[in-house]
Amino acid sequence: MKKKSNDIHAVIHATEEAKRGLLVSVSTSSSLAMKIAIVRNEHWIAVALFGKSALHYMTNHERAGLGVMHI
């Protein structure tokens, strides 16, 4: 499938939205381990991020972020 500028624009904005949800109150020196999922249909794209953040391996916090954008 040929990439179009509106497809790229939508995935970038959905990813940024998901990232903001994931990184709320996370220390800048935290380690992140996450899974990423991208789904789309004809008019919408969604990016989901799920994983763990920690300053130390004994202090893991599960985190999730979701971004949705119209194509």
Image (cartoon, grey):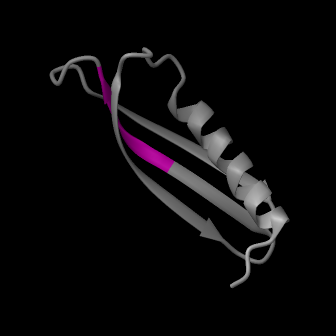
Query: What secondary structure prevails in the magenta region?
Result: strand
Magenta run includes residue 22:
no
What range is drawn magenta here?
Answer: 49-54
- Quadrant of the rendered structure where residue 40 is? bottom right
**Quadrant containing the C terminus in the rendered view:** bottom right
Q: Could you tell whether 35 is left or right of 18 in the image? A: left
Residue 6 picture location, percent across and down: 84, 63
Which residue is depicted at the point 59% across and 68% down?
39
Q: Could you tell whether 32 is left or right of 48 in the image? A: left
Which residue is depicted at the point 64% across and 58% down?
46
- Quadrant of the rendered structure where residue 60 is? top left
Front residue (pair 44, 32): 32
Residue 32 picture location, percent across and down: 35, 33
Q: Using the rendered image of the protein, determine whether residue 62 is visible from the camera's viewpoint.
A: yes
**Quadrant containing the N terminus in the rendered view:** bottom right
Q: Does 60 sit above or below residue 3? A: above
Which residue is depicted at the point 37% across and 45% down?
34
Q: Could you tell whether 5 is left or right of 52 in the image? A: right
Q: Using the rendered image of the protein, determine whether residue 71 is visible from the camera's viewpoint.
A: no
